């Protein structure tokens, strides 16, 4: 991969003083760690619709599925203004060719899930989506999205980062020529990564690629991407990863000594028991992939789905 990944982000997470109280919500992991691999496209819906900093705070009011964006003290309704602006802004964002978006959690404009929505008697439920985030997700349903609060969870963080790197490779595939031959190559290299998220999507995608010649090329790409992103949204659990590790071990059954096999089995068992992180069996398997130059496994993104420096597989 040559280019940085282009991601949208709620501006306040990069430290811009755009919040209603004149402050920011700088997220050090996003700016300083993930930021080394990312070109950020910052978006602050409230400032971009022309509101000042500081400004009156807002909240969502009404039905969770179609809430209104209302200022807390004076009751001004900014919903229509925000939606009108969003249509134009999303047209611009489409041209940016993003690989995902990181939203500010809990914001009535930018929060992607579990945003408070107040009913007429003033009681909140946690079922809303911010007005801009909702419009974004509706327009780009397959793009990876997360909020900075959920990214503190190591499993969700790895899941999101895996998806943005897959999306970047998907765009590279489209830029190559998007042909069926290239789709088969793309799929082959992602097989074990997909399996680590969902055996069901692994079979659906396998069948799609096997039947690729029956589809028009645009249709196969559309269906493949939809199932791919649906499958990758499911988290890779210890059980699913263990299944993939055991599957990989099968490639070395005639190559390893009895001792080496036993060591590999024990390490996979320790991972399964939650004693060592995923990076431990992966490192040993990578060693054997290189030593024996195993042709199928060495092409698998499962072994190196994102830069090791992000240390995403180092947690137990
Ligand atoms: S949460 Fe969204 S609207 Fe609020 S300051 Fe951050 S970017 Fe702007």
Image (tube, helix red, strand yellow):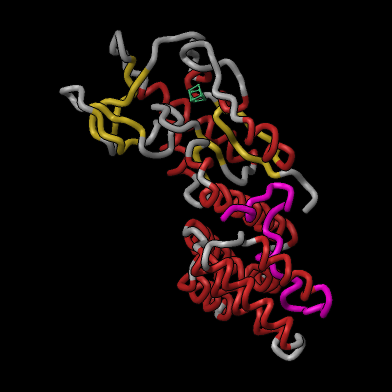
For the point 62% across and 43% down, the residue is 98
Q: Is residue 231 magenta?
A: no
Task: Determine whether 121 is above or below 218 in the image.
Answer: above
Residue 123 seen in this snapshot: yes
Q: Nearer the viewer, residue 26 or 70?
A: 26
For the point 84% across and 76% down, the residue is 291
For the point 61% across and 49% down, the residue is 161
Task: Determine whether 294 is above or below 299 in the image.
Answer: below
Q: Nearer the viewer, residue 281 or 207?
A: 281
Apparent side of residue 12 relative to residue 282 in the rendered image (left or right): left
* First to last magenta residue range: 290-316
Q: Give the percent coordinates (x, y) of residue 25.
A: 54, 23
Q: Is residue 300 magenta?
A: yes
Apparent side of residue 61 relative to residue 231 in the rendered image (left or right): left
Instruction: Check the picture and name the quadrant holding the C terminus.
Output: bottom right
Apparent side of residue 252 relative to residue 61 in the rendered image (left or right): right
Instruction: Check the picture and name the quadrant holding the N terminus.
Output: bottom right
Q: Give the percent coordinates (x, y) of residue 170.
A: 65, 58
**Residue 184 in which image quadrant:** bottom right
Spot the residue most to the left. 121
**Residue 79 in which image quadrant:** top left
Apparent side of residue 15 relative to residue 110 in the rendered image (left or right): right
Task: Determine whether 284 is above or below 48 in the image.
Answer: below
> Which SS type dominates the magenta stretch?
loop
For the point 53% across and 30% down, the residue is 89
Q: Give the percent coordinates (x, y) of residue 52.
A: 50, 9
Task: Determine whether 262 is above or below 220 in the image.
Answer: below
Residue 222 seen in this snapshot: no
Q: Give the percent coordinates (x, y) of residue 76.
A: 31, 13
Q: How many labels were placed on the picture? A: 0
């Amino acid at each position: 991969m040559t280019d940085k990944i282009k991601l949208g982000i709620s501006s306040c997470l990069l430290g811009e003083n755009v919040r209603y109280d004149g402050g920011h919500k700088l997220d050090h992991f996003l700016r300083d760690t993930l930021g080394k691999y990312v070109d950020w496209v910052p978006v602050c819906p409230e400032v971009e619709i022309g509101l000042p900093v500081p400004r009156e705070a807002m909240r969502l009011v009404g039905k969770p599925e179609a809430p209104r964006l209302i200022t807390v003290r004076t009751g001004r309704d900014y919903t229509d203004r925000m939606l009108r602006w969003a249509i134009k802004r999303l047209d611009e964002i489409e041209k940016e060719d993003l690989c995902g978006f990181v939203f500010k959690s809990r914001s009535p404009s930018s929060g992607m899930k579990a945003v408070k929505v107040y009913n007429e008697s003033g009681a909140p439920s946690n079922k809303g989506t911010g007005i801009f985030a909702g419009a974004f997700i509706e327009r780009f349903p397959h793009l990876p999205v997360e909020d900075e609060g959920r990214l503190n969870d190591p499993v969700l963080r790895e899941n999101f980062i895996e998806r943005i790197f897959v999306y970047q490779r998907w765009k590279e595939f489209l830029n190559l020529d998007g042909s069926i031959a290239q789709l088969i190559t793309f799929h082959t290299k992602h097989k074990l990564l997909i399996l680590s998220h969902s055996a069901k999507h692994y079979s659906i995608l396998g069948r799609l690629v096997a039947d690729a010649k029956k589809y028009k090329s645009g249709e196969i790409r559309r269906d493949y991407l939809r199932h791919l992103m649906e499958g990758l949204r499911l988290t890779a659990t210890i059980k699913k990863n263990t299944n993939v590790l055991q599957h990989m071990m099968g490639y070395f059954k005639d190559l390893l000594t009895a001792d080496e096999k036993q060591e590999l089995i024990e390490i996979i068992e320790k991972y399964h028991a939650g004693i060592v992180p995923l990076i431990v069996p992966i490192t040993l398997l990578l060693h054997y992939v290189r030593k024996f130059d195993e042709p199928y496994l060495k092409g698998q993104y499962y072994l190196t789905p994102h830069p090791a420096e992000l240390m995403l597989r180092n947690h137990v």
